């Protein structure tokens, strides 16, 4: 919390980078020297808070990552008493300060997401960092790494589930697709996450993604993205009866299948 406070009030971001951020980006104890030195921070509930404070573009997105105690400590526009008057401890605009600090971390964060997309997708904290990095920097190589992780094969004796069935992973993918759907520039983004994900699984959306209730939620989100929705719905309508059968078959866990079936019906548009 002390590091968060420093990042929130110190105007000299260059000095803060040299004295604090550079050290945080070094991990001499890492077992694998090729790993990102900030991987442990990103996967940590507390360590990831630094990135989640700096990356979001507005307070509404930022504040949802912090609990009431942290919000109290990190309250905006802190002041000190000077000659009987309250004066701000910082002169720099908070958004400017956070933007400058995030730029100091940009290379490390992009490297993190390129190397460890799979691990981040399966982590509650890591997934939040991955999403905010994609929002803040929209790096083509990061998006390719996420799509590749989504297609990662899982052995039968592996404890991991495929990303689209993973309790955390499918939600992170869904949130990334929701971000694309809400982006006004989406139609112009041929290399967006939603576009590359669709291209990767084109012709096998149901067999690769939609066979589980969680995967059905992912497809529902994909079908809402303007850049690919027509193609996605056209392909899924070929499986309309199969999806309806899944709704009827999975009475206890059918919310995803039902949402998908409703989303692709022409009468609902």
Image: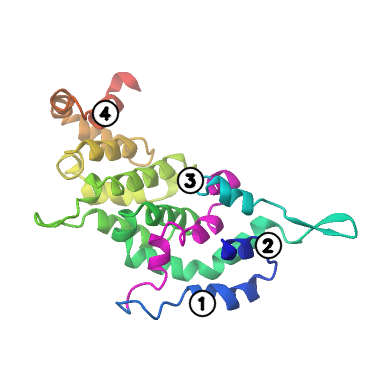
Q: Which mark is residue 9?
A: 2
Residue named by callout 1: 23
Q: Nearer the viewer, residue 57 or 267?
A: 57
| Residue drawn at the location 90% of the way across and 60% of the way down | 83
Q: Quadrant of residue 147?
A: bottom left
Distance between mark 4 and mark 1 Cα atoms: 46 Å
User: Which residues are drawn in magenta?
Assistant: 34-63
Residue lying at 49% horizontally and 73% vertically, measured from the top left: 24
Q: Which of the 4 quarters of the picture holds residue 239?
A: top left
Q: Indicate the secondary structure of the residue bearing disc 2.
A: helix
- Which residue position holds label 3? 185
Q: Residue furthest left?
A: 156
Label 4 vs label 1, nearer the camera: 1
Q: CA distance from mark 2 to mark 4?
A: 45 Å
Q: Nearer the viewer, residue 264 or 78?
A: 78
Quarter the N terminus occupies = bottom right
């Amino acid at each position: 919390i002390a590091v968060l406070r420093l990042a929130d009030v110190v105007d000299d971001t260059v000095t803060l980078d040299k004295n604090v951020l550079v050290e945080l980006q070094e991990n001499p104890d890492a077992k694998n020297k090729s790993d990102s030195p900030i991987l442990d921070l990103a996967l940590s509930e507390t360590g990831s808070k630094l990135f989640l404070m700096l990356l979001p573009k507005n307070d509404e997105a930022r504040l949802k990552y912090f609990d009431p105690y942290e919000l109290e400590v990190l309250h905006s526009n802190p002041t000190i008493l000077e000659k009987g008057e309250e004066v701000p401890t910082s002169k720099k605009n908070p958004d400017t300060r956070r933007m400058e600090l995030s730029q100091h971390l940009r290379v490390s964060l992009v490297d993190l997401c390129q190397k460890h997309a799979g691990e981040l997708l399966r982590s509650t904290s890591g997934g939040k960092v991955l999403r905010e990095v994609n929002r803040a920097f929209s790096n083509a190589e990061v998006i390719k790494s996420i799509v590749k992780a989504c297609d990662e094969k899982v052995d039968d004796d592996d404890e991991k589930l495929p990303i689209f069935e993973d309790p955390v992973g499918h939600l992170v993918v869904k949130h990334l697709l929701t971000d694309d759907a809400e982006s006004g520039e989406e139609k112009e983004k041929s290399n967006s996450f939603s576009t590359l994900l669709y291209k990767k699984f084109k012709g096998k959306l149901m067999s690769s993604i939609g066979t589980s209730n969680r995967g059905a939620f992912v497809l529902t989100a994909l079908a809402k993205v303007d850049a690919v929705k027509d193609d996605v719905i056209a392909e899924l309508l070929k499986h309309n009866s199969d999806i309806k059968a899944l709704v009827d078959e999975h009475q206890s866990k059918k919310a995803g299948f039902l949402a998908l079936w409703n989303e692709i019906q022409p009468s609902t548009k």
